[in-house]
Image (cartoon, rainbow, N blue to C red):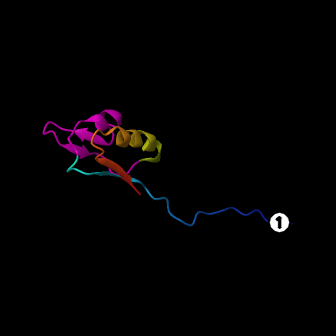
Amino acid sequence: MMANVTSVPTQETVMAKIAVNFDLCESNAVCMQVAPKYFEVRDDDFLYILQEEIDEADAATVQEAVDRCPKQAISIEP
């Protein structure tokens, strides 16, 4: 007779984080249009990251913001 064995993850879940190369960023606000929970271009024309860690449910939305950045200034880091 075999016992039921439940697999237990041995590694903690790693949250992905947003990274911006501000030398490349032109504050076009495309990212803000796609993912306003994470990005904001304010009246001073600078981009602000509102939330650095990406919620799992928002991963596709943030990836779209990365993909649509005209200057390719945004990336996702593990």
Percent coordinates x, y for residue 52 in the rendering = 33, 51
Q: Which quarter of the rendered picture does the C terminus lie within?
A: bottom left
Does the magenta-highlighted stretch encompass residue 31? yes
Residue drawn at the location 20% of the way across and 50% of the way down: 23
Q: Main secondary structure of the magenta part?
A: loop
Percent coordinates x, y for residue 44 in the rendering = 12, 39
Secondary structure under the numbered disc 1 in the rendered image = loop
Looking at the picture, which amino acid does disc 1 mark? Answer: Met
For the record, the magenta segment spans 25-54
Percent coordinates x, y for residue 58 in the rendering = 43, 42
Percent coordinates x, y for residue 46 in the rendering = 17, 42
| Residue at far left of view | 44
43 left or right of 76 in image: left
**Would you identify the image quadrant in which residue 59 lies?**
top left
Vertical order, 60 against 3 (above or below): above
| Residue at far front of view | 71
Residue drawn at the location 49% of the way across and 59% of the way down: 13
